[in-house]
Image (cartoon, rainbow, N blue to C red):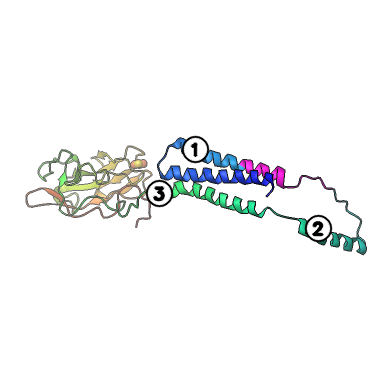
Amino acid sequence: MTPKERVIALFIVLAAAGSGGFIAAYFTGGSRLLEGVSLAGACAMFGAAALGWAFWIVPQEHVVDEVEGYPSQTIERMKQTNELTEVQHLVTRPVALVRLLAAALGVFGLALLVPPIRSLGTDPDETLFHTKWRKGDALTRIDGSFVRADQLNVNAVETVFPEHAIGDPMSVATLIRLRRGLLADAPDGYVVYSRLCTHAGCPVALYRKAAHELMCPCHQSTFNVLDDGAVVSGPADHALPRLPIVADAGGVLRATGDFPVPVGPGFWERP
Ligand code: FES
């Protein structure tokens, strides 16, 4: 290696070291400053190596090749061919530098891949598909009291949670008491819907009793309480999931299972 090639090699090694430093800093949860400095250093060293390569390795001579009229003389062509064959062995490539550069670029590529891969987070498993409602869970207010079937007046609304997951944002639901007989499968006129809007997840908090509709204040999606939460208007394109409930022998309202479909905005195709 010539002295100039050694300088370029040093730049490349420093670039690889900067990339490695970034990986180490990211893995150890180091400071942002260290990550930024190491990555910027790597880029700067690659830039310096590229400049050195351009000015010291790539030939700078200005060659003018006169084009003769065709056809060129056979004797001329043979002369040129012989000349090229003779000097072929003199043409060299900085193989070591090329290999070093490939390795450094590999480390740099790894440095770019580490943040997205390491920051993927944990597998959500089934948590996005289910809430904490289980069969037998009492419908529970935020203060921990159970809702009994004889407590609410017609058109009254309550926010309820599973008894063992009070405050859980995925499980929060709206309990509405309808007039008896309005909905055949509503025990004592009670229906429960997920409070998470299926458009973008805002709380569907407004009950329009005259129309029996739940309305989301964010973008005005409305859901039909008498039709399994079907969308009446607005940008939501999925019905509001309804929680199956019964009133037990003591009059306490209880879930008979989880919501039949995932709650909230859909990130998958629902039937
Ligand atoms: S979040 Fe409810 S309508 Fe947009």
Earlier residue among tags 1 and 2: 1
Q: Position of residue 11 (x, y in %)?
A: 60, 43
Judge from the rendering whether residue 254 lies leftward or rightward of residue 77; answer left or right: left
Q: Position of residue 271 (x, y in %)?
A: 34, 57
Labels 1, 3: front one: 1
Disc ID at residue 120: 3
Image quadrant in which you'd find residue 208: top left
Residue 264 is inside the magenta segment: no
Q: Position of residue 31 (x, y in %)?
A: 43, 37
> Do the CB atoms of the residues marked 1 and 2 lie less than 8 Å apart?
no
Labels 1, 2: front one: 2
Q: In what element is the residue under mark 3?
A: loop
Whereabouts is ligand 1, in terms of quadrant?
Answer: top left
Which residue occupies 54% across, 52% down?
Answer: 106
User: Disc 1 designates what residue?
Assistant: 36
* Cα–Cα gap, marks 1 and 3: 20 Å
Q: Which residues are magenta?
A: 47-63
Judge from the rendering whether residue 47 lies leftward or rightward of residue 69; answer left or right: left
Which residue occupies 11% across, 48% down?
Answer: 252
* Residue 71 visible in the displayed image: no
Above or below 220: residue 183: below
Judge from the rendering whether residue 148 lies leftward or rightward of residue 12; answer left or right: left
Which residue occupies 67% across, 41% down?
Answer: 51
Residue 57 is inside the magenta segment: yes
User: Disc 2 designates what residue?
Assistant: 87
Q: Position of residue 75 (x, y in %)?
A: 92, 63
* Cα–Cα gap, marks 1 and 2: 48 Å
Residue type at mark 1 is: Gly
